[in-house]
Every structure is written in C-alpha cells, then in structure tokens.
Amino acid sequence: MSARIEPPAPDKGVPLPATAGPGVSGERSTVSTGDGSPRRTEARFMHHIPRRPTTARSGRGDRRPEGRFWRILVLCQIDNFTTLRRHLGRPRADALVHDVSDRIAELCHDVRISIAGRAIVEIAFERDSCEAAAADIDRVRQAFQRPIDLDGEGYQLNLQFGIAAAPSTESDEVRLAEAAESALEQAHAENRVVMLDLSRADLAFDKLTLMRELPRAMAAGEMFLQYQPKVHVRRQEISSAEALVRWEHPVRGLILPSDFISVAEQAGEISALTLWTLRQVIQDQQTLVSDGQDLTLFINISGVLLADKAFVEEACEIVSSTDAKIGFEITETAVIRDPESAIRHLNRFAEIGVTLAIDDYGAGLSSLAYLKQLPAKELKIDKMFVMQLTSSNRDPLIVRSTIDLAHALEMEVVAEGVETPSALALLSVMGCDMVQGYLISRPLGFDAFRQFLADDSYFSGAGGANSFIRPESFWKRA
C-alpha cells in the first residue's frame, strides 16, 4: 500500500525556540507521521515552493548508503529574487541560483544539486534519519543568514526550504517530488518549514475519509486553482496556461491532486469537480482579458467523463454561453477506454470552439489509429521523456519523432517538464512549438499568475532581454 502525505497541522508540533534571522519565521519544523504524532526535528527553518531534478552535481559522487536509510529531497527557493533582480539587473540575478548551488556544494559535499528554475535549487541526498537531514539543512540555512558578496556589495538572500523524506523502501520518485513541492507550498502559505514523511501507511482510511469530505470541500470553497504558463518558442510569448486544481483541507493542509482526483472518480464526484473547475477557469479567463491578456486556459478532463453524455452536454452549454478561450486536455488512455464515445464527444467540443490537447503522450499505450481521428490541435509530450532529454540517448529520438509525427498531423507540440536551458535549446532545434515547466514558472495561484504576466510582459515581445529570450549563441553554448 503506497503512502499518502499529510502535511502536519501547525498546532500539533512541539514548538522549539529559534533565533530568527532575516526572512526566517523563527519556528522549528515538525515531521508528520501516520499516528498523528509529529516527529520532532532538531533544526530551524524558513519558508516557500517548486519541482524536480535536471542536471545533478555532487561533491563526492552519487554515493548511496547501504542498508536502511532515508532519501531526502529538498526544494530551496530564493524568496526575494524579484527584489534582488531590481537591484542587480536581470543578467546578474539569473546567475544567483548558481551562486546558491555552489555555496551549498561547499557546505554539503555528498549531496546532488540540480538547478530547477530561475530561483530554485533542488538538493537530493541520503541520511540515517530525518533529524540528521534537518541538521544539514539547518547548517545551510545558517550559512545564508549573513549577507553574501555579489560584485563587491553585500546582499541578503532569503532562502526558503521545503523537505520530503522517504525510507529506502519507498522508491517512487514522482511521489517524493510531489511531497517536496507540497511541503514548500504549505511552508509558504504558513510562513514556516514543513518536512513531510512518506513512511505513513494510512492511505486506505484517508481515501474513505476524503470520499466523504469531497462534496463538502467543494461547497465550502476549499478547492482552488493554480496556473502554469506555456511559452510559444518561436513567438517567444506566453500563449496559454494549464489550470491545476488544488485542495486546501482545513485540518490536513494541502492535499495533492494524485490523492483526491482518483477519489473524486471513485466517489462519482469528478463531474461536479470538473464543472466547478470549468466555471472558475472561464471567470479567470475573462479577468485576464480585462488585464489585456487574452490567453487560452486549459483544464484536464478525466477519461471517465468522455463517455458521460450528461457531463458533455452541460460542459458544452457552459462553454457556449461565453466567448472565453478554453481548452481541454485529455489523455490517450481516456480515448482508448471507449473510442467511439470519446471521439464523438471530442468532436462536439471542437465544434463549439474548445481547443483540444492530447496530454501525457507516450506515457500510455499510444495508438496511431486513434490519434489520427482526434480533432486535437496540440500534443503534449510526457515529461518523462523531456526531463532526461540531455542525458539520454533514446529520449531525444523519441521526442524528435513525436514532434515530426504531430506536425504531420497538423498539431502543435508542447513539451512538459522543461527545467533547464539546455533542454529548451534542444527542443527549439527539434522544432517543438511550446514548452511548459519550471524553467518558465511553477504553478501559481491566480493572483500570482496575473502578477507574473504583468511583471514578465517582456515575453510578449515588449522589448528588453529576459531569462527566456536569449541570443542564438547562448543556446548553442547551452
């Protein structure tokens, strides 16, 4: 039975004194365990959020201890990056993440460090206990309490940490990455660090509980949306965004979509949840239009719903009543379940102006027979092929052939999980149309997304250099 992560409630931990420096909440962290009693850690921390490994580096090689140990994944973000960018200028600010990773490598010689975004560093390592991991991260935190010298001037970097810990028997890399993201998001929301322990074994009970609580959660407004932008490579502008539903539980904290989406399907609530999402996305899209940002917003449609005639009718009625630019993302496997109904209903969506995208292409049983029948305009290459694009011999071949296939079928291609400039450079050379991932932005709450579009309006070609638009020589070096 796989574990479900439960963020620790603020009132369950044992408060430990801390000397708060700049940007530090002054609280000690707690580790959530299955019995509700938090494990106490011997470290002090800070707050904030991001995603997974790309090009790793390590001081003493990728050594893994023998026997029982804990696998640790830490997401570290420069919280005051925007402020520093104003003072330092964009080119120097973009190099800050490398300064941070170099310093962490000096402090912890046996960790693997990855750059996961403009202001995000990911740290992976193994320890005998969660407490030992917490002590190491506390040492890193303390080292950054003092201003660092940047070109002759002292600047304070406010680093935020989110930690996920799993025993050596837990081998699900995606689960560990999602837990680290959840920890950092919750830490940002609560202005404190959260370390999440994946060793719990109460998922079956949780699913039954979540099944009962889901209708109440939708009625109580506990669901909310985050948006992750997609950038058009040739036009060098943000062309659309994917809406991602989240559940902020009043007791459990942030619940991951991987936990409650399947619950919604089993409980028969997936239609209500998706229609709520659709209405909210339409409202948000119209708000963006008033901001001068007429972007297409995509939502994910469960395969269960493609055969649901009542859902299709209501969704079409909702979309037809507005001029909002809406897109639906569906997976290949959703079509294969009931191809006749799925293709008929997808054509109905296309007829009313919904942009259709095939999501996670390559992750399931790809069928060219169905692919050529779908009225899709976009094909999204699964991130499992993109994240190892520059370190694998086979993945580039798969990605290139998929891009050529999609173009032959008159579809644009979106690459998910783009986290490094080198991956973006290679995708650009291959002819990929759009990219999505932490190199561009993590998923953002709607207000933060609006601010992101306002701050990064240079994506639309308003002029000036930025972290995405680079001269050709830069991409060749990358």
Image: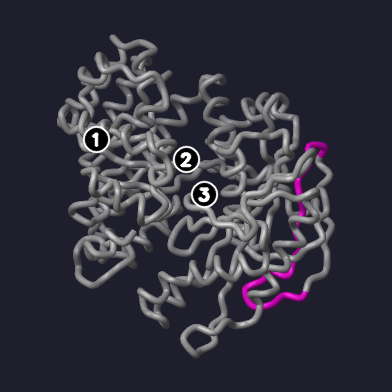
What amino acid is at disc 1? Ile
Q: Closer to the N terminus: mark 1 or mark 2?
A: 2
Look at mark 3 in the image and give the residue it sits on: 53
Give me the residue at 26% from left, 18% from top: 368
Distance between the alpha carbons at the discs numbered 2 and 3: 24 Å
Mark 3: which secondary structure? loop
The x and y percentages for residue 238 are 27, 54
The disc label shown at residue 245, or none: 2
Question: Dot 3: within a 10 Å radius of its alpha carbon, few (fewer than 14), some, or many (20 or more) residues?
Answer: many
What amino acid is at disc 3? Pro
Mark nearer the viewer, 1 or 2? 1
Mark nearer the viewer, 2 or 3? 3
Give me the residue at 67% from left, 57% from top: 110
Mark 1: which secondary structure? helix
Q: Nearer the viewer, residue 452 or 477?
A: 477
Question: Dot 1: within a 10 Å radius of its alpha carbon, few (fewer than 14), some, or many (20 or more) residues?
Answer: many
Mark 2: which secondary structure? strand
Q: Quadrant of residue 143?
A: bottom right
Say if the magenta span includes residue 242. Answer: no
The x and y percentages for residue 155 are 53, 83
Say if the magenta span includes residue 28. Answer: yes
Question: Dot 2: within a 10 Å radius of its alpha carbon, few (fewer than 14), some, or many (20 or more) residues?
Answer: some
Q: Which residues make up the magenta segment?
A: 19-35
Look at mark 1 in the image and give the residue it sits on: 403
Q: Is residue 361 above or below residue 231?
A: above
Q: Is residue 352 above or below residue 19?
A: above
What amino acid is at disc 2? Val
Distance between the alpha carbons at the discs numbered 1 and 3: 24 Å
Screen quadrant of the N terminus: top right
